[in-house]
């Protein structure tokens, strides 16, 4: 059996104009493997149909633009030029006319190319959308391989072109972000009093991670900090965001716009949770007049857990004063309860006591070897003391908050950080990043994760309809 697939082009009035064969399919006896189209046949079909369709569209457009738009006089033909245009269904070589401008309408240049003017970018919006979406979730190389496997674009895209396109889109996103201002709070108390009753507080948490850095030009390497966070509304909907701190020039504005897109009102409370790192806290100031800043309980309890583990490993004891491993563990537990109730002063005293007790075991008194574990505990305790005294004013009565159903921990941020940073940037990905490259990728990635990327594309390219590109929930690779 032989099946020929043809394209029939009809004029507006339904007259048959051109019939052209796009592919031919041969089949012998039916087997599971040859029922219907194969991927290769489908690719050929799509590629050839695309060529025929585009040829018609270009011819029609050129016909419409062959005369002067003012005086309708036919424009003089100069020559033909080839434009390369990449689409989902193959790279197109568009042979298009260059025309002289009409004498009735003097222009700066003598000639122009209507098609080149129509297509200032040389990649179709839909291909750009798919490339950037995939590449924000997996490596550039893998994205390129997968797209080539399923679309008739073998040998026509590569990791570098995908990366360059994605970076350009990231820059476009950045250019749309309004300028940074010292203070982003808008209006005054009188204005805020007039606002409608706001929603319940928005909770926003941030955390940092490190990404390996490499600059090919200077062959410098090292690490740079990436901040990521998540903002959660009372109804449970959330948005994630991220930035490379040393590169970003508008970090506060970025967080502010996330909050605003979630409907933040100036009379609404916003709870900022942080791990106590200064760069993150600075970022959270001046975004809302009703902001409260809280040290994340998760980070306190995590540190105490680590110290308790170390205390468990201590074997040396001082029976005279009763300092044993159990004694230290019990004291750490009491320290935790002081902090749970927001009693910073008491907690600092308890840390001092613990350091004294730990030091007794860490020294080489009592005719015995100093305990290395106790030394380790002491250095953790000293660090913890600094941490608590630096963050004292951000330590609330967690117990009371918890009792009132208020948020005390941003364990949700850990997952946000993993979503925004880890999978695409660390460990298994052998690639090394530049701060700019990572920052721009994070911007696209956050849009994809927030399921906003398709609506952004429809805003940029109004000709794209909901039917043509549609946001689907992101599949998270394990
Ligand atoms: Zn004219």
Image (cartoon, rainbow, N blue to C red):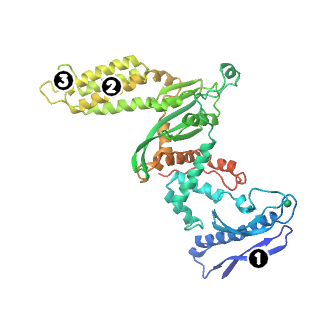
Per the rendering, the mark at residue 19 is 1
Per the rendering, the mark at residue 332 is 2
Q: Select label 2 or label 1 by which is in front.
A: 1
Circle 3 Cα neighbour tier, 10 Å, few/some/many (<14 / 14–19 / ≥20): some
SS of the residue at dot 1? strand
Task: Please determine whether, in this image, residue 116 is positioned above or below residue 181.
Answer: below
The residue beneath circle 3 is 318
| Distance (Cα) linking label 2 and label 1 | 84 Å
Q: Is residue 136 left or right of residue 3?
A: left
Taking depth in this image into account, of 159 and 343 the one nearest to the observer is 159
Residue 46 location (% of width, % of height)? 65, 69
Residue 296 visible to the viewer: yes
Circle 1 Cα neighbour tier, 10 Å, few/some/many (<14 / 14–19 / ≥20): few
Which is more N-terminal, label 1 or label 2? 1
Residue 226 location (% of width, % of height)? 47, 41
Residue 255 location (% of width, % of height)? 57, 35
| Distance (Cα) linking label 3 and label 2 | 18 Å
SS of the residue at dot 3? loop
Taking depth in this image into account, of 291 and 296 the one nearest to the observer is 291
Residue 232 visible to the viewer: no
| Distance (Cα) linking label 3 and label 1 | 98 Å
SS of the residue at dot 2? helix
Which is more N-terminal, label 1 or label 3? 1
Q: Is mark 3 within 8 Å of ligand 1?
A: no
**Looking at the image, which residue is at 25% across and 22% down?**
357
Q: Is mark 2 within 8 Å of ligand 1?
A: no
**Looking at the image, which residue is at 77% across and 73% down?**
8
Q: Quadrant of residue 74?
A: bottom right
- Labels 3 and 1 touching (C-beta < 8 A): no
């Amino acid at each position: 059996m032989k099946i020929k697939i043809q394209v029939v082009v009809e004029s507006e009035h339904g007259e048959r104009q051109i019939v052209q064969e796009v592919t031919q399919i041969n089949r012998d006896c039916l087997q599971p493997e040859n029922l219907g189209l194969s991927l290769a046949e489908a690719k050929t079909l799509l590629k050839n149909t695309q060529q025929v369709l585009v040829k018609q569209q270009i011819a029609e457009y050129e016909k419409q633009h062959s005369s002067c738009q003012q005086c309708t006089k036919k424009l003089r033909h100069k020559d033909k030029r080839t434009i390369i245009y990449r689409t989902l269904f193959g790279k197109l070589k568009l042979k298009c006319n260059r025309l002289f401008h009409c004498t009735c309408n003097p222009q700066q240049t003598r000639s122009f190319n209507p098609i080149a003017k129509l297509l200032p970018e040389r990649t179709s919006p839909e291909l750009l959308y798919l490339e950037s979406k995939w590449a924000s979730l997996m490596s550039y190389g893998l994205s390129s391989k997968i797209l080539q496997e399923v679309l008739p674009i073998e040998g026509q895209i590569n990791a570098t072109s995908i990366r360059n396109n994605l970076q350009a889109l990231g820059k476009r996103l950045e250019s749309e972000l309004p300028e940074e201002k010292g203070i982003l709070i808008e209006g005054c108390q009188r204005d805020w009093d007039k606002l409608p009753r706001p929603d319940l507080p928005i909770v926003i948490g941030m955390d940092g991670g490190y990404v390996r850095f490499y600059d090919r030009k200077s062959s410098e390497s090292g690490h740079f900090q990436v901040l990521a966070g998540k903002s959660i509304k009372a109804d449970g909907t959330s948005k994630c965001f991220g930035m490379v701190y040393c590169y970003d020039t508008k970090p506060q504005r970025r967080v502010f716009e996330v909050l605003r897109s979630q409907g933040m009102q100036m009379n609404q409370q916003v709870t900022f949770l942080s791990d106590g790192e200064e760069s993150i806290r600075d970022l959270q100031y001046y975004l809302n007049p009703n902001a409260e800043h809280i040290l994340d309980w998760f980070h306190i309890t995590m540190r105490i857990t680590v110290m308790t583990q170390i205390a468990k490993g201590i074997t040396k004891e001082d029976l005279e004063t009763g300092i044993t491993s159990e004694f230290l563990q019990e004291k750490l537990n009491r320290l935790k309860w002081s902090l749970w109730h927001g009693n910073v002063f008491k907690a600092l005293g308890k840390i001092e006591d613990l350091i004294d007790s730990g030091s007794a075991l860490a020294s080489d008194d009592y005719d015995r070897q100093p305990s290395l574990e106790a030394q380790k505990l002491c250095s953790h305790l000293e660090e913890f003391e600094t941490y608590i005294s630096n963050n004292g004013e951000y330590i609330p009565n967690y117990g009371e908050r918890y009792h009132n159903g208020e948020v005390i921990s941003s364990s949700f941020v850990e997952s946000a950080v993993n979503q925004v940073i880890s999978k695409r940037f660390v460990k298994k990905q052998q690639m090394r990043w530049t701060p700019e490259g990572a920052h721009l990728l994070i911007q696209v990635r956050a849009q994809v994760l927030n399921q906003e990327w398709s609506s952004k594309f429809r805003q940029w390219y109004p000709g794209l309809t909901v039917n043509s590109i549609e946001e689907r929930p992101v599949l998270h690779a394990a």
